[in-house]
Image (cartoon, helix red, strand yellow):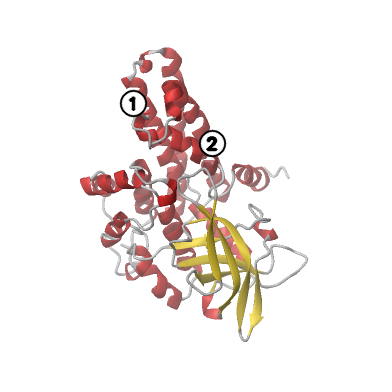
Amino acid sequence: MTSSASAAPAPDTFRQDIRRFFTSDEVRRTLKTVAAHRPDEEPARLDLYRLLGERGWLAPNWPVEYGGLGLGAAEAALVTEEMTLAGVPDDVHVLSIDIVGMFLLQAGTEEQKRKHLPALARGERTASVLFTEPEAGSDLSALRTRAEPDQGGWRLYGTKVFNMKSQFADVALCAARTTDGAVGMHGITLFLLPLRSPGVHIEPVPSMQNDRFNVVVIDGVRLTEEDVVGTVDDGWWMLNDLLQLERTGIDFHGKARRLLDLIIQRAAATGRLDDPVYAVELVELDARLRAGHAMAWQMVRNLADGRPDAVASAMSKWYVSEQFRPILRAGMEVEGMDGVLSGWDPEAPADGLLEANHRLSPAHRLASGTSEIMLYLIATSGLGLL
């Protein structure tokens, strides 16, 4: 929040404005076009991101001078929730705004902020993250991408994998090792890596998703101290502290709620909602999602009050993302074999959303921290069991 911040609108009014935007004819036409893409026709930057940016809604909690509205965590969560409820692809938003933008806001230099944040907030640029490596997934202390000293700067060498949207992004937040030592957590530095630099090679990794993963090979790209985010060798602590801020569970809840509401509508249309065998299970799933929604919004309130709770956030993320499997199972019980028809089949129920979510569902337990890592964090930091 800055002195030039906008007056915070009433939450209900702000939500209604956001919802009207996402249900407008223009946005629905865009989503219909996106849904018609085949996997090898993955869309890049969506026009509706630019439209959100023009209104200051893409990053409403950012200061006005960086393209936001100077609002708070609640308004940012409202945008995220309505975006996922409307079925808007949110990968670029999560990467550019919730992760890279948030890191720059918290730890970037003033020059870095002014260079990157306004364009990200307007939807004119996108960013990606380069953390995961072939031998370093959830345990980033094992990463091997290295930054070798070079005339007052560094040259980066390494391979990153399973990152999304890097083929479209302008810049990436890249974790690299600047110092070797006995303790793997020490010596990691975060860099802003221009992805159109000579020495950056990006190619697709086959997956079941409509949107592709990538492998990024970095071969001798030279960076300077102006490209360092935060402090040299201190990236591990930044990753642990700042990534916790994205784990509210709001985005996962919105996707799960949209899917369950669709299944309930299909059950009503086919008469199965009158059958207790189906109705009882759907009511139970609805209750679980309502509980998850309450947990997620408590995490948002914690952020708004300046007291984020890493353990509670892990609980919220784990609980909400684990609901996808029983929801998908219930959907298959309602639809039967038609539930495996893809969106490219004209006879697919609900435009093939159930089939698409079956292919996507493993990612829900991996994104923003795997379920296993969330349980480990709860067991160690929360319960003191290990």
Pick out the residue farthest to the left: 25
Q: Relative to 1, is 224 above or below?
A: below
Specify the label residue 265 is tagged with: 1
Q: Is residue 16 above or below residue 232?
A: above
Q: Residue at 42% across / 30% down in the picture?
A: 341
- At 29% across and 69% down in the image, what residue appears? 4
Q: Which residue is mark 2?
A: 322
358 relative to 309, above or below: above
**Contact (Cβ within 8 Å) of mark 1 with mark 2:** no
Sort mark 2 into few (<14), some (14-19) or many (20+) by Cα contacts within 10 Å: some
Residue 204 % position (x, y): 53, 55
| Pair 1/2: label in front | 1
Name the spot of residue 9 as percent of width and height, x first: 26, 53
Q: Which picture quadrant has residue 349?
A: top left
Location of the N terminus (image quadrant): bottom left
Choose between 49 and 368: the one closer to the eye: 49
Badge 1 marks a residue whose secondary structure is helix
Tell me, yes or no, if residue 132 can be seen here: yes
Inspect the image, locate mark 2, and give the three-letter code of the amino acid beneath it. Glu
Q: Residue at x 48, y 59 (%)?
A: 99
Q: Residue at x 41, y 71 (%)?
A: 116
Residue 378 placement (x, y as % from top left): 62, 44
Q: Which residue is outermost to the bottom?
A: 151
Q: Earlier in the sequence, mark 1 or mark 2?
A: 1
Residue 283 at least partly seen: no
